[in-house]
Amino acid sequence: QVQLVESGGGLVQAGASLRLSCAFSGGDASTYIMAWFRQAPGKEREFVAGIRWRDDMINYADFVKGRFTISKDNVKNAIYLQMNSLKPEDTAVYYCAGDRAYYVGPDLYRGVRDYDVYGQGTQVTVSS
């Protein structure tokens, strides 16, 4: 059974950077598409960035382009979200998500229900 475990959240000031990590275990990561979602208080969970494991095809939400970078490490079986120039509106619980979708690209896989595995989430708080 696939498990995802996030880490790296915290409290930072506006303009700072954080790197979130997601450890993947229990399956063949190369057949998965992975993503980061976030959920702010009182708001719906939203897509942040996605990456197809087998070929690094990547897609970003418009609101993070140029500030966030998604990447992966095949040796460590992990994905990352490097977040720069953080803003108070980036405050949310960030979730790692995965689904077996070998042929689908992350540009077409941005819905919460597209993914069947989620981690427990990690809190990111950006103060002004």
Image (tube, grey):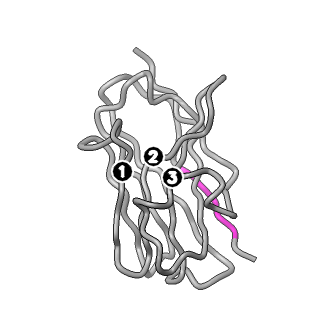
For label 3, the residue is 36
Question: Looking at the figure, which quarter contains the C terminus?
Answer: top left
Question: Looking at the figure, which quarter contains the N terminus?
Answer: bottom right
Tell me whether circle 1 and circle 2 mark residues in contact (CB < 8 Å): yes
Q: Earlier in the sequence, mark 3 or mark 1?
A: 3
Question: In 3D space, how far apart are the residues under numbered discs 1 and 2 (Cα atoms)?
Answer: 6 Å
* Image coordinates for residue 13, horizontal then vertical, percent: 39, 23
Image side of residue 77 versus residue 73, left or right? right
The label shown at residue 18 is: none
Q: Earlier in the sequence, mark 3 or mark 2?
A: 3
* Image coordinates for residue 56, horizontal then vertical, percent: 34, 73
The label shown at residue 60 is: 1
Residue under the image location 36 percent in, 50 percent down: 60
- Within the magenta stretch, is there residue 5? yes
The label shown at residue 48 is: 2
Tell me whether circle 3 and circle 1 mark residues in contact (CB < 8 Å): no
The picture quadrant where one finds residue 65 is top left
Residue under the image location 51 percent in, 52 percent down: 36
Q: Earlier in the sequence, mark 1 or mark 2?
A: 2
Q: What SS does tag 2 mark?
A: strand
Tell me whether circle 3 and circle 2 mark residues in contact (CB < 8 Å): yes
Residue type for callout 3: Trp
Residue type for callout 2: Val
Question: In 3D space, how far apart are the residues under numbered discs 3 and 2 (Cα atoms)?
Answer: 5 Å
Q: Residue furthest left?
A: 66
Secondary structure mainly formed by the magenta segment: strand
Q: What SS does tag 1 mark?
A: strand
Residue type for callout 1: Tyr
Residue under the image location 50 percent in, 80 percent down: 102
Relative to 92, say whether 82 is above or below: below
Span highlighted in magenta in the image: 3-7
